[in-house]
Image (cartoon, rainbow, N blue to C red):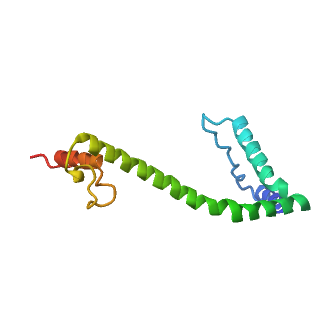
């Protein structure tokens, strides 16, 4: 503050133009001052929610216990559950394709799922969509 006061008095003594004042920028029409204050208060509460359990020695020990529990029990359970969900979804899709193939009476299994194609492009619906795109792109 002292340096600013000295600079201001030097500018006045030398008859220099005053320093430009910082202008307050207008808030966008969607954001009012009260809304920004509310967002700031919510961020403050969220920060306190995260840091408050570490305020006491017992709270700090509880944070360590919860972290240890998550690392040893919760996280190791997540990959098998994710694999289970993936396999269940793929199996359901293959089952639906098999039922459609069986009920159609067709003898050409590759018309429903062509395993020689890359990725999931062998699925009958994707084959149909890719054929539609090819026909529109290569108009003759």
Task: Establish if 118 lies above or below 85.
Answer: below
Q: Residue at x 27, y 45 (%)?
A: 101
Percent of width and height locating residue 86: 48, 54
Locate residue 108, reporting x and y percent: 20, 51
Q: Residue furthest left?
A: 140
View extreme (right): residue: 57
> Position of 121 compared to 89: left or right?
left
Left or right, 80 with respect to 95, comes to right
For the point 8% across and 46% down, which residue is it? 140
Q: What residue is drawn where x is 36% and y is 44%? A: 96
Instruction: Where is residue 95? Give x, y as percent.
Output: 37, 48
Residue drawn at x 82%, y 61% is 6
Q: Nearer the viewer, residue 36 or 25?
A: 36
Q: Position of residue 32 (x, y in %)?
A: 67, 35
Residue 94 shows in this picture: yes
Quadrant housing residue 82: bottom right
Looking at the image, can residue 10 be seen?
no
Q: Quadrant of residue 57?
A: bottom right
Horizontal side of residue 18 vs 102, given as left or right: right
Quarter-of-image position of residue 62: bottom right
For the image, the number of numbered tags is 0
**Left or right of 89 in this view: 116:** left
Above or below residue 135? Residue 58 is: below
Quadrant of the rendering where the N terminus is positioned: bottom right
């Amino acid at each position: 503050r002292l340096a600013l006061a000295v600079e201001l008095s030097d500018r006045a003594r030398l008859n220099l133009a005053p320093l430009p004042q910082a202008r307050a920028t207008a808030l966008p029409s969607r954001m009012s001052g009260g809304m920004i204050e509310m967002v700031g208060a919510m961020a403050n509460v969220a920060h306190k929610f995260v840091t408050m359990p570490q305020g006491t020695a017992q709270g700090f020990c509880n944070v360590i216990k919860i972290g240890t529990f998550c690392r040893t029990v919760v996280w190791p359970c997540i990959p098998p559950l994710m694999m289970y969900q993936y396999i269940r979804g793929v199996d359901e899709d293959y089952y639906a394709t098999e039922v459609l193939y069986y009920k159609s009476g067709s003898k050409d299994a590759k018309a429903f799922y062509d395993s020689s194609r890359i990725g999931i492009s062998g699925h009958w619906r994707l084959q149909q969509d890719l054929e539609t795109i090819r026909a529109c792109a290569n108009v003759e």
